[in-house]
Amino acid sequence: MSFQWILHRTPFLRCLSFSRTFSGFNSLHRINRLDQLQCFTRRRFNEQSIFNINTSVPKDVILYKSSSDRTFKMISIFSIVQFGFWLTVADTYNVLLKQKPKDNEASQMISWLDQLKAKGKILTVGIPVACLCMGAMLVGICFVYTMKSVKMLVLCRGGDKLSITSFGFFNRNITTTIPLENISCAVGRNDRGQSIPMKVKGKWFHYILDKNGKFFNPTLFDLTAGMRRNI
């Protein structure tokens, strides 16, 4: 006589087997619900721990600092050298245009100058002016880039203002204090890219934060200076 036949013929054993199977499924369901509850509690705790950080700091706190002083000093020197180069080109061109050929000198040496003189003041005056504009434009680009490159960010006492220190031309630091409500970062600290553009309401161009710099308080930075705002 097999065990299955006994189980089939005995109602009590069938009920006992069914109750054991049901209790097994019930225990597995209870364990699964417990794991879900623990995961939910852990996730909710992490979210609350992030948003419960006090941003009203009692004293000034450094959020970010970059140590690229040498790089920006070289950029300033490069702009001055380029301006001197284009100034020299403009002066040399002006001297050649004013040069008069001698009687015993072959005219082939300055034939291209004679052709430029024949075309009027558009080329004789325009080329030196264009060289000067090129040098001035390079200086202006380097000046704006260094002025908008952030060297240090400091969250001021109280947590409602941010002090932005940029490198400036030849590392002459420029410090500006701006309310946090007027600052917005479209790109997060953990997003792709080598820099973080920071928009300031009422100012031209964006401030640039190099990600190679050091974030001293990453979470506090994300909740203050690194937030995206509608400005």
Image (cartoon, rainbow, N blue to C red):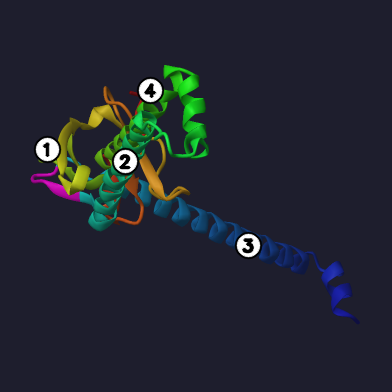
- Looking at the rendered image, the quarter that the N terminus falls into is bottom right
Which x, y percent locates residue 80? 26, 44
Mark 4 residue crowding within 10 angstroms, few (<14) / some (14–19) / many (20+): some
Q: CA distance from mark 3 to mark 2?
A: 94 Å
**Place of residue 32 in the rendered image (x, y in percent of width and height, measured from the top left):** 56, 58
What amino acid type is highlighted by mark number 4?
Answer: Val
Tell me which numbered mark, 4 or 1, is placed earlier along the sequence. 4
Q: Residue at x 18, y 48 (%)?
A: 171
Residue displayed at 73% across by 67% down: 17
Q: Give yes or no for residue 96 being in the magenta stretch.
A: no
The segment highlighted magenta reads 57-62
Along the viewing direction, whichever of 23 and 28 lies nearer the viewer: 28
The span from disc 4 to disc 1 (Cα, nearest Å) is 58 Å
Q: Nearer the viewer, mark 2 or mark 1?
A: 2
Tell me the number on the disc at residue 78. none
Secondary structure state at the residue bearing disc 3: helix
Judged left or right of residue 27, residue 206 is: left
In this view, the residue in front, 208 or 104, is: 104
Q: CA distance from mark 1 to mark 3?
A: 58 Å
Residue position for label 1: 158
The amino acid marked with disc number 1 is: Gly
User: Closer to the N terminus: mark 4 or mark 2?
Assistant: 2
Above or below, 225 relative to 67: above
Q: Which residue is mark 2?
A: 88
Q: Earlier in the sequence, mark 2 or mark 1?
A: 2
Q: Which residue is mark 4?
A: 125
